[in-house]
Image (tube, grey):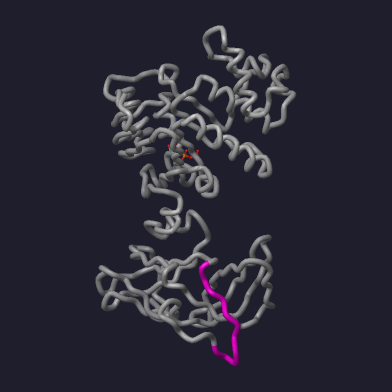
């Protein structure tokens, strides 16, 4: 093994189930000490990818390399127990007839296995529960035992499938952070499957966004969030507003002013996408909004349909006067204007994404009626 070699490489992995392609020619590299999240909607092939990396399932095409050595592909298939990979699943299945320390020591070899198990329990803050049995622990404590068990053999790669989804919200954040701390300290390369964008943003060094068996975008969380590849990728991370337009001379006219659509041919339908927190709200002053600016374009007026307080922010839904569509804007703190209040919205150009609408039939350019 060389220093700069990736820890685990999946290369051109394809897996079919009865003619249905669950994973399609997927390639992914895990680096030492980095957390990679496979993120995507239910059924997009995340677990299948992880199971192939673990060796509990086998690819139909492609190969898996650990430290540069082939562990699966062609006629080679190293079984899971020989891969020195730690596994942690949503159903973490502790052995009910073994106490906590025995559960953690299970699978460790040598005379110091109990000492190592106790050391790991110390790390997850459960050394004082070592002699208890799993049914005597809370869900969160059981999860931490499972983590200690998975980490006890010092795996250099950890594969985790929705490991926190069985925990309630309050416990989840704490255990997630503790787990991340331990994995980082140990320098483990991690592949974590989740369908929750917040979890991926919180845990990942890199997010691999999956859709229909393929990775559609990969990168650091802030890159994926701030430079989504298309509307679907943007919408996976938060609610989005979509304004439709048509390209004329590399730009499109909308009720919010013009937007550049570089490189797009005349007549192309485009979707202008903006997150609710990036819409600017202004009060109506005698039927007027703020003056247009190059940064924020032209304001458009709407009437408040509903406003709700969500905790750290307020969500305001506006029925827009230009086409009766509904747009959502959020503002920090408490802002609860009455139903029917006129407000103006503007779109900060540096916060908008302009994508080709493709064959999205629901995208009807504003003002054209078609
Ligand atoms: P989820 O978040 O719901 O767990 P996922 O992204 O992990 O979804 P997979 O479990 O990898 O998705 O499944 C991908 C596709 O492959 C799904 O359509 C699923 O029904 C199918 N699939 C997975 N395992 C099998 C199997 N053993 N036999 C048949 N089809 C399968």
Residue 42 located within the stretch drawn in magenta: no
Q: Nearer the viewer, residue 270 or 345?
A: 345
| Residue visible at 45% across and 77% down in the picture | 296
| Image: magenta residue range | 278-288
Q: Give whichever of 214, 234 is nearer the camera.
A: 234
| Residue 280 belongs to the span the image colors magenta | yes
Residue occupying image coordinates x 60% and y 36%: 178
Residue 149 pos. (x, y %): 57, 22
Which quadrant would the C terminus be assigned to in this image?
A: bottom left
Q: Nearer the viewer, residue 286 or 116?
A: 116
Most distant residue in the bottom direction:
286
Looking at the image, in which quadrant does ligand 1 appear?
top left
Query: With respect to residue 109, does 118 lie above or below?
Result: below
Residue 350 position in % (x across, y down): 42, 69
The image quadrant that residue 174 belongs to is top right
Could you tell whether 339 is left or right of 362 in the image? right
Asked whether, in this view, residue 337 is left or right of residue 351, the answer is: right
Asked if residue 38 is positioned above or below residue 308 in the image, the reply reads above
How far from the left and from the top, in percent, is residue 203? Answer: 52, 42
């Amino acid at each position: 093994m060389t220093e700069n070699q990736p820890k685990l490489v999946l290369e051109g992995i394809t897996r079919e189930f009865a003619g249905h392609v669950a994973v399609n020619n997927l390639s992914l590299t895990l680096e030492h000490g980095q957390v990679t999240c496979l993120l995507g909607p239910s059924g997009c092939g995340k677990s299948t990818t992880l199971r192939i990396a673990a060796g509990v399932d086998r690819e139909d095409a492609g190969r898996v390399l650990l430290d540069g050595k082939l562990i699966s592909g062609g006629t080679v298939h190293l079984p899971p127990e020989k891969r020195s990979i730690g596994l942690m699943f949503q159903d973490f299945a502790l052995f009910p007839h073994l106490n906590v320390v025995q559960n953690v020591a299970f699978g460790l070899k040598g005379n110091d296995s109990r000492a190592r198990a106790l050391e790991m329990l110390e790390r997850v803050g459960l050394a004082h529960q070592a002699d208890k049995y799993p049914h005597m622990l809370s869900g969160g404590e059981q999860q931490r035992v499972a983590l200690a068990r998975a980490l006890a053999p010092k795996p250099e790669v950890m594969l985790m499938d929705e490991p926190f989804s069985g925990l309630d919200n309050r416990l989840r954040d704490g255990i997630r952070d503790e787990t991340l701390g331990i994995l980082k300290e140990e320098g483990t390369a991690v592949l974590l499957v989740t369908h929750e964008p917040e979890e991926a943003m919180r845990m990942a060094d890199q997010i691999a966004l999956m859709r229909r068996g393929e990775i559609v975008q990969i990168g650091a969380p802030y890159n994926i969030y701030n430079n989504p590849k298309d509307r679907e990728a943007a919408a996976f991370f938060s609610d989005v507003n979509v304004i439709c337009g048509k390209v004329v001379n590399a730009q499109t006219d909308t009720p919010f002013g013009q937007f550049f659509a570089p490189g797009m041919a005349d007549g192309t339908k485009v979707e202008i996408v903006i997150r609710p927190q990036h819409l600017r709200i202004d009060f109506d002053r005698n039927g007027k909004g703020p003056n247009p600016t190059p940064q924020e374009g032209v304001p458009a007026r709407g009437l408040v349909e509903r406003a709700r307080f969500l905790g750290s922010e307020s969500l305001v839904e506006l029925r827009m006067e230009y086409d009766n569509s509904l747009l959502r804007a959020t503002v920090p703190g408490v802002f609860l204007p009455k139903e029917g209040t006129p407000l103006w919205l503007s779109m900060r150009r540096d916060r908008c994404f302009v994508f080709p609408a493709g064959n999205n039939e629901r995208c009807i350019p504003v003002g054209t009626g078609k």
